[in-house]
Image (spheres, rainbow, N blue to C red):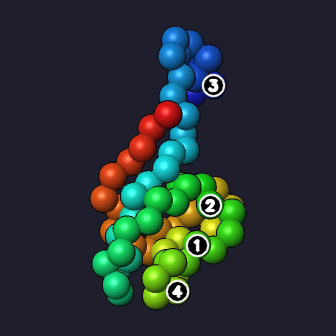
Amino acid sequence: MTRKDKLLRLNPQPRSNFLLVQCPECSSKQIIFSHASIEVKCFVCGKTLAKPTGGKAKILGKILKKYYE
């Protein structure tokens, strides 16, 4: 997509969203931000669910649902 195409979009959508992620270890569910800037850990077992990469976070659990604004 070129810069001109981005400017011509009538209703731009956000590139980030919230995700419902299932922990691979204890199967608990947690909502996290797709562009997390810090390491996100499971509330129950403490396993890492997302690692920051400078842009989109690397999601280590199973994504169950995306929530858009």
Amino acid at dot 2: Ala
User: x, y percentage for residue 35?
Assistant: 60, 55
Q: Which one is nearer the viewer's eye here, 4 or 11?
A: 11
Looking at the image, tell me whether mark 4 or mark 1 is earlier in sequence order: 1
In the figure, is residue 22 to the left or right of 6?
left
Q: CA distance from mark 2 to mark 1?
A: 8 Å
| Disc 4 packing (10 Å; few <14; some 14–19; many ≥20) | few
- Residue at the image position 52 percent from the left and 11 percent from the top: 10
- Residue at the image position 34 percent from the left and 84 percent from the top: 26
* Marker disc for residue 40: 1
Looking at the image, tell me whether mark 3 or mark 2 is earlier in sequence order: 3
| Disc 1 packing (10 Å; few <14; some 14–19; many ≥20) | many
Q: CA distance from mark 3 to mark 2?
A: 26 Å
Q: Say what secondary structure mark 1 lies in.
A: strand
Q: CA distance from mark 4 to mark 1?
A: 9 Å
* Marker disc for residue 46: 4
User: x, y percentage for residue 6?
Assistant: 58, 23
Amino acid at dot 3: Arg
User: x, y percentage for residue 15?
Assistant: 54, 40
- Residue at the image position 49 percent from the left and 50 percent from the top: 18
Amino acid at dot 4: Gly
The residue tagged 2 is 36
Q: CA distance from mark 1 to mark 3?
A: 33 Å
In the figure, is residue 18 to the left or right of 40?
left
The residue tagged 3 is 3
The quarter of the picture where residue 57 lies is: bottom right
Q: Say what secondary structure mark 2 lies in.
A: loop
Q: CA distance from mark 4 to mark 2?
A: 17 Å
Looking at the image, tell me whether mark 4 or mark 3 is earlier in sequence order: 3
